Amino acid sequence: MKKPKKEMSDVGPSSGAAGVKESSLMWPMLSRSNYTEWAMLMQCNYEAMEIWDVIDPGGAGVKRAQDRQAMSALLRSVPKEMWQTLGGKKTVKEAWEAVRTMRVGADRVKDVNAQKLLQEFENLQFKEGEKIDDFGMRITNLVADLKVLGETIDDVKVVKKFLRVAPACFTSVIVSIEMFCDVKKAHRGGADRAVARDGGTPRGEGGTYN
């Protein structure tokens, strides 16, 4: 009597030794900014498949089949440009450590850059003869760059920064902003309207705007 054939889904690397099937889990994709969340979900998946011990503690006692199963899942959860580097590692534990080193290093660089831009924001001043529109473009671009790095500067802080550093030739604009905007709830749209009412260039001789 012939033995019944086993279905492909019941054997091989699609499930852990006694854990859930790999195909039933949600596998995250690593990006430049989600390493912490990615690592947490990957660990949960490995634990559900009962193969997390190939990474922690790892070591000589790890079965090759389980190591390759974990490596396959890891490679599927990182960008293609990382495949060659990680796939060349002898064990999935080594690949896991490589991902952590790359991403934690990237996060540190990002934090350093963010701190530099925050300092630049604090030190930002009007250049000699600079128009409000030009200064506004500089500060807007700086705020946008900080947002990309995970640092958010709200409109209230931007408006307060302008009021603090605006030259005396923009007194009428400052007065308009203070009159028509609640600085504690200010947003750049309201400040822009105030600027538009009073002009966007320094006051020249004879009481007119250049």
Image: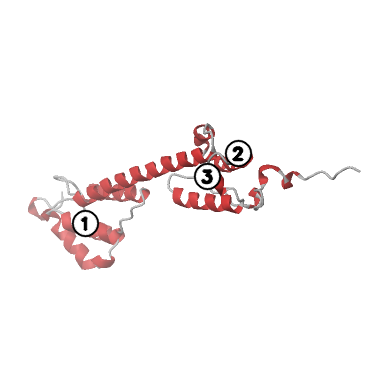
Q: Residue at x 29, y 59 (%)?
A: 155
Image disc number at residue 57 = none
Q: Amino acid at mark 3?
A: Ile
Closer to the chain start, of discs 3 and 2, is 3
Residue tagged by mark 2?
Answer: 68
Which residue is denoted by mark 1 in the rendering?
A: 161
Outermost front residue: 61
3D distance between C-alphas at marks 3 and 2? 12 Å
Q: What amino acid is at disc 2?
A: Arg
- Of residues 11 and 24, the one nearer the viewer is 11
Q: Is residue 181 visible?
A: no
The amino acid sitting under disc 1 is Lys
Nearer the observer, 38 or 53: 53
Q: Are marks 3 and 2 in contact (CB under 8 Å)?
A: no
The residue tagged 3 is 55
Residue at x 8% of width, y 51% of height: 205
